[in-house]
Amino acid sequence: MLINIQNIHIQSVKTLSNQDVHTDILRLDLIHPVISGNKWFKLKYYLDEAITAKACKLASFGGAYSNHIIALALTGKEAGIPTIGFIRGDADTALSPTLKEAVSYGMELQFINRSDYRDKQLIQDSYHQSGWYWIPEGGYGLLGAKGAADILNIHDTSSYTHIICALGTGTMMAGLNMSAEPSQEIIGISVLRNHFSIKEEIEQIISQMPEKKSNFQCLHGYDWGGYAKHSAELLNFMQQFWWAEKIPTDFVYTAKMIYAVHDLIEKGFFTTGSRLLLIHSGGLQGNRSLSPQILPF
Ligand SMILES: *Cc1c(COP(=O)(O)O)cnc(C)c1O
């Protein structure tokens, strides 16, 4: 496959390190320009299962700038399995660059209005055809988490005291929780507003695992107004971070996570001697909704 796992490396982040805390970042964003970051990890076991089941179509859900949808479109193309994306929103609006690109990989789109979109089971029941393989939105579920568990097995990450990632569905964190050392603390930064049920949603995945350890905590209050919401200050932070570290971020996930770490370090959240590993989960699709001159990368 075209995924370059060997591109993943650990990079130190000097602007988030001081005499007390050392911070590194795991660059999952470098595996592929389109199937960037955690979406590949979360998709791979679903894909294996679909291939084993000889599925004739891969179906899933997502928004107009969904990293998951574009990753699925290209993964399906590479695997030779047609894909269909159930997209939140109305068909009469212009296609986003993300959806246009998904269509160029052969994905069929079906638009679902915002209120109907809430009931995924009903969509699945209404549209299902024999031989279709359904992947939950964002890859949420045990197979997604199993794939994400492999994120910590690429390099030796045992020396870190904290593993920190952005939280959408929480699937990635459920996986990290599975493969982290028992002494490591996993911190997820929620990018949704007051999404307090995320903890149970993660516990729900963990409850299906053979080993049920849970060393994680979810932090709220770093959503900047809600999912995909942002401000000039956040975009400014992304620019500063790029100039200082040459690391691109997206305003939906990784910028909010990195800003949170910056803020937590300032507030003395981490004890002296902490070694943080941030997960750069990739996913730069959201940035395509900004005007082209705004970001320097
Ligand atoms: C999808 C995504 C996440 C969230 O992952 P979950 O497993 O849904 O919590 C985080 N970062 C990026 C860049 C993503 O695209």
Image: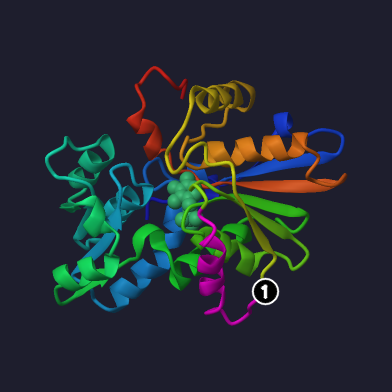
Asked whether the viewer can see residue 230, the reply is yes
Name the quarter where the N terminus is drawn. bottom left
Answer with the quarter of the image where residue 262 lies.
top right
Q: Furthest residue to the bottom?
A: 210
Asked whether the viewer can see residue 4, the reply is no
Q: Where residue 167 sits: x, y (%)?
A: 53, 52
Q: Furthest residue to the top?
A: 293
Q: Residue at x 56, y 31 (%)?
A: 247
Left or right of 138, for residue 266 = right
Q: Furthest residue to the left?
A: 92
For residue 11, above or below residue 178: above
| Residue sitting nearer the eye, 173 or 82 | 173
Q: Residue at x 41, y 69 (%)?
A: 45
Q: How is the image coloured?
A: rainbow
Left or right of 195, for residue 51 = left
For residue 161, above or below residue 34: below
Q: Where residue 230 sits: x, y (%)?
A: 46, 32
For residue 218, above or below residue 131: above
The residue labelled by disc 1 is: 213
Q: Secondary structure at mark 1?
A: loop
Q: Where residue 238 sits: x, y (%)?
A: 54, 27
Residue 211 shown in magenta: yes
Answer with the quarter of the image where residue 221 lies.
top right
Crowding at label 1, few (<14), some or many (≥20) Cα neighbours within 10 Å?
some
Q: Residue at x 60, y 26 (%)?
A: 241
- First to last magenta residue range: 195-212
The kind of residue on which mark 1 rests is Lys
